[in-house]
Image (cartoon, rainbow, N blue to C red):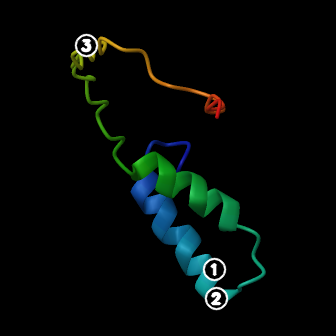
Amino acid sequence: LRDGGDAAGALAHLQRATQLDCQAGVKKEIERLERELKPKPEPQPKAATRTPHKTRSVTPAKRGRPKKKAS
C-alpha cells in the first residue's frame, strides 16, 4: 500500500499488525509513515527587528581594582 501511494492505508495495516503481534518488526515503518503524514510546519520568515544602540556615557565605566588612597 505504501508503494502504491496510500500511506494512510499502509499505516492502518501496520498498526493492526502491531496489535496482532507486538514483535512484528514494523515499528520503524510506522514511525516513518507517521512522519510522512504529519504536515510540515511552514517556516516563519524572521522579522528584521533592530535594537537601537546604547549611547555611550560621558565617563567610561570604571573597571578593575580601585586605586589606593594615600594617607
Report the amino acid beneath label 2: Leu
Q: Which residue sits at x=42%, y=15%?
A: 60
Q: Are marks 2 and 1 in contact (CB under 8 Å)?
A: yes
* In front of the other: 39 or 17: 39
Checking the image for residue 18, the label placed there is 1
Q: Is residue 54 above or below residue 2?
A: above
* In front of the other: 68 or 50: 68
Q: Are marks 1 and 3 in contact (CB under 8 Å)?
A: no
Please provide percent x and percent y for residue 18. Answer: 63, 80
**Image position of 29 (left or right of 41):** right
- Please tell me whether mark 3 or mark 2 is closer to you in this view: 3
The number of discs equals: 3
Please provide percent x and percent y for residue 43. Answer: 31, 30
Q: Quadrant of residue 50?
A: top left
Q: Which residue sits at x=49%, y=51%?
A: 35
**Image position of 45 (left or right of 59):** left
Report the amino acid beneath label 1: Thr
Q: Which residue sits at x=58%, y=59%?
A: 31
The residue that label 3 is drawn on is 55
Mark 1 or 3, nearer chain start: 1
Q: Is residue 57 above or below residue 29?
A: above
The residue that label 2 is drawn on is 20
- Please tell me whether mark 1 or mark 3 is closer to you in this view: 3
